Image (spheres, helix red, strand yellow):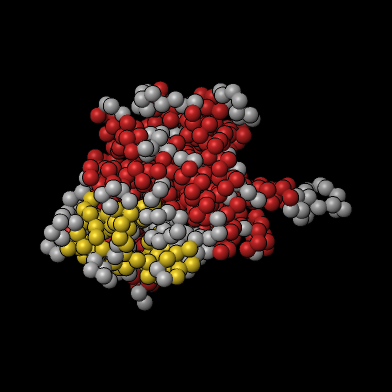
Amino acid sequence: MTYRAPINDMLLALNHGAGLNAAVAAGHYGNYDSEITAAVLEEAGRFASEVLAPLNRVGDSNGIKLKDGKVTTSPGWPDAYQRWIAAGWNAVSGAEAYGGQGLPLALNAVCTEIWAASNVAFGLCPLLTLSAIEALDAHGSEELKNIYLEKLISGEWTGTMQLTEPQAGSDVGALRARAERADDGSYRVFGTKIFITYGEHDMTDNIVHFVLARLPDAPAGTKGISLFLIPKFLVNADGSLGARNDIYCSGIEHKLGMHAAPTCTMTMGDNGGAIGYLIGEENRGMQCMFTMMNQARLCVGLEGVGLADRAYQQALAFAQERKQGRAIGEKPSKSDPIIVHPDVKRMLLQMRALTAAARTISYATAVALDVSFRATDPAVKAAAATRAALLTPIAKAFSTDIGNEVASLGVQIHGGMGFIEETGAAQHLRDARITPIYEGTNGIQAIDLVTRKLAPNGGEAVWALIGELSAIVDEVEASNDPAFGSTAAKLREGLAALERASNWLLQRLPNQPNDALAGATPYLRLFGSALGGCMLASEALAARTMEGIGDAQRYVTLARFFAENVTVQATALERTVTEGADAVTGADAVLLA
């Protein structure tokens, strides 16, 4: 089956759950006309359904090919990409001064979900270009911006991130790529990078690589890393492409999923060194790279949402068509669609509810990032930046975990047919599996949440968010809508568990950090379960008062299911955080036996 973007669900999540309408009303988006939101998303959904979704299986089946240092993408890929940039999709949130449309990052975030749902391997390419644009715009010289930014924003050229080396994955400080200063102010870079997504391809004339390397006199570790812009082809003074730079694809990886997205080994320096240009300051490359990575982490979370929604749509269609067994009380002479069975209904509700919660968390992260850039009040900007920083690891890790769980449920609903490649259910699971790994593993996201986002100022950012979520629960109680069932009670229990777990971690971090880190991953899941439940309840409350949204009670039903089936797990997760540390920290006798 093809993909259809769930526009109404997306608009409800963006405008109400994530708070875009409130931010627009507060003046944080200047003269942005929110009426344009639906029109843009409708068009994005149409492009995804008509152009990208049909190529999803084509790319998975054909993969990519490397010959003589050149990568050939799957049939239809280059043409689809040219249609992509001609339609202006690469430029949605780009700066207007360099040819972008200047639309909110939050709007582009919804589009990112749509691209991931329709064809995640294709969507990876512009995802990385967006991160490159952010780094160049924030840290690049005016000269480099004038040469490269317009081409990247339009999508005429694409960008890559190059961090990983065979001995330096998450431990970036262990990298060995080296850079040497040249007399003309440029640099020569030598080394090998691995796992470089879209490091080489045939969809554009030029590729702009952002590469971490170390200067000869640099300090050890991450404090001695610099970031360099290294184009595949050098650029002449008139803007035309010049000589081929000394950076090549020397190998491609054969992967579990994402077959159509080239994952390259990149070699620099076989012919005198790749010519590079410094981004930011020497030995301050990690600061620049984090600009790219934080943007990419949100986008990877949106990949998880998109893959989950695609898996749900396919599983729902299959459950409505596949006939097996009979509904209770029906005559044995006929078979019913499997959707009549309570356990199948439960799995489908689980898929949709988890997807919806992850969606709103990700959109809320994008709105917070927008406000941190766009607001004029310094206090508002600072508060939004803090909120965005808090939500980013949750958006990345919770959403990608959900992507895997929902895709796995999709296979389960298909039964034996789900294990067969022809149905396509298995591809969603294979494609989703990388998302909790790249752009910072989900374990690293959990550590970041506990040590860098919870810990500062005694948990101030967390307490502020819990206060807002408690107000939502108050509204659910005040609604007196029996359709909510025990939603309010379950959400209160979840928030109380989150508060207690947060306090426990704050107490352990100074003197017993290993105990705190042992509980970091279940704490992140606890956070996402409480946060997602409250956000879905907020959307349900909004839907009840809106016109033109159809059966608004379906959102109440979804919020109730999440609260009574997912958020209800919060107290168990709290106990895992607060009571399970000793079993982890004392496990060496088992693990090292």
Q: How many marks?
A: 0
Q: Is residue 38 visible?
A: yes
Residue 580 in view here? no
Tell me residue 562's x, y (percent).
54, 41
- Residue drawn at the location 28% of the way across and 47% of the way down: 238
Q: Nearer the viewer, residue 130 or 268?
A: 268
Left or right of 239 on screen, residue 486: right
Which of these two is toward me, 19 or 572?
19
Q: Hey, which residue is sitting farthest bottom in the picture? A: 593
Most distant residue in the right direction: 333
- Taking the image as shown, residue 388 lies to the left or right of residue 144, namely right
Residue at the image point whose x is 40% and y is 48% from the top: 156
- Name the residue at 64% across, 30% down: 551
The relative height of residue 544 versus residue 46 in the rendered view (above or below) is above
x then y, percent, for residue 346: 63, 47
Residue at 45 percent of width and 70 percent of height: 67
For this rendering, which residue is in front, 483 or 356?
Answer: 356
Viewer-nearest residue: 580 or 105: 105
Residue 534 horizontal/vertical position (percent): 47, 36
Residue 519 horizontal side relative to residue 221, left or right: right
Classify the position of the C terminus by image quarter.
bottom left
Q: As displayed, is residue 387 above or below residue 222?
A: above
| Image height of 295 relative to 551, above or below | below
Percent position (x, y) of residue 59? 55, 59
